[in-house]
Image: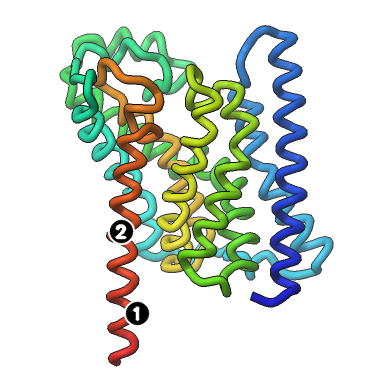
Amino acid sequence: MTTDSRKKAYVFIVITLILSYAAGLAGWMLTRQQGGRLSVGFLMGYMFIPMIVAIVLQVFIYKEPLRTLGVTWKFNRWFVIGWLCPLFLSLASLGASSLVPGVHFSPSSALMDPQPSPIPEPETGQAVDAMQHWPPWAILVFALAFGLVAGATVNAIAGFGEELGWRGFLYHHLESMGFWKSSYVIGLVWGVWHAPIILQGHNYPDYPVAGVFMMIAQMVLLSPLFTYIRIRSQSVIAPAIMHGTINGTYGASTLFIMGGTDLTTGAMGLPGLIILGMLNVALFLLTRKRTKKHMVS
């Protein structure tokens, strides 16, 4: 990694964190006055901060084209793989949650917990009424299908707001560090970036402080998977879709779950962390095998 690239990466990190923490403080002051939580609109706006910083630095400061950050729509199978991967993470986390002491499956609980809801917000009440008599498998399929559609559309747009920063600008300037080191550095920054909204109850409403550390661990272990999709697809759009789909499907990982907490159940809790750890090991073995194969050939 050249000194110039390192400097650009540091500048991006510092500016992004300063602006994001300032926005988080403003959001906290506003919601405190109104006595509520961070709105969906604020959270989506927060996700666009890395993109704005990346564009300003790349285009207006460094005078370089956005395509060098992976902004390309050249479709390939890795777009689909990145889109479908969150299904495995959600389902595996759902299964792993049942192994947590004090946690058990309860099909009737699927429509009782509004956080996070697998049902589109504006139609939540009507959809819940219509789904009261659905079998559990149908509710799960609906939740995952909705997450897939949202993940490839509106959620992907919001995901791009982050990914142009993380897997676009930051990866571009940290790439020479090597796959694993750059992935974990980006994951650490990604996790720390979430702190202002986690402290205000996002994802872990009952454990805001512990939630910050859980979120950092989640992002560090999730980052190599995103980086791999970014490399294989040769586009930052693919991880943006993956990002949006994770946001759209993680709620399904707590369907039918009774007991436990935000920290001990679901894709964002301990089960998800364990699954991500296993996927990191699998990815390590896969990349090592590919490296050896290329060396032999």
Q: Which label's residue is closer to the chain start, 1 or 2? A: 2
Left or right relative to 258: residue 183 = right
Work out which quarter of the rendered image holds the N terminus and state it: bottom right
Q: What crowding class fits label 1: few (fewer than 14 Cα within 10 Å), some (14-19), or many (20 or more)?
A: few
Applied colour scheme: rainbow
Pick the residue in front: 156 or 93.
93
Question: Going by the image, does 145 lie left or right of 233?
Answer: left
Residue 223 lies, in percent from the top left, at 47, 53
* Residue in view at x 55 percent, y 26 percent: 209
Report the amino acid beneath label 1: Thr
- Residue to which mark 1 is pinned: 291
Under circle 2, the secondary element is helix
Q: Is residue 137 above or below residue 227?
A: above
- Circle 2 crowding by C-alpha within 10 Å: few under 14, some 14–19, many from 20: few
Judged left or right of residue 12, residue 71 is left
What residue do we see at 76% from left, 40% from top? 19
Q: Amino acid at mark 2?
A: Val
Instruction: Pick out the residue farthest to the bottom.
Output: 297
Residue occupying the point 25% across, 20% down: 257
Residue 89 position (above or below residue 264): below
- The picture places residue 247, in percent across and down from the top left corner, at 45, 36
Q: Position of residue 54 (x, y in %)?
A: 71, 55
Residue under pointer 2: 281
- The answer to whether marks 1 and 2 mark residues whose Cβ atoms lie closer than 8 Å is no
Where 101 sits versus 144, above or below?
above
The part of the image, by quadrant, that contains residue 285 is bottom left
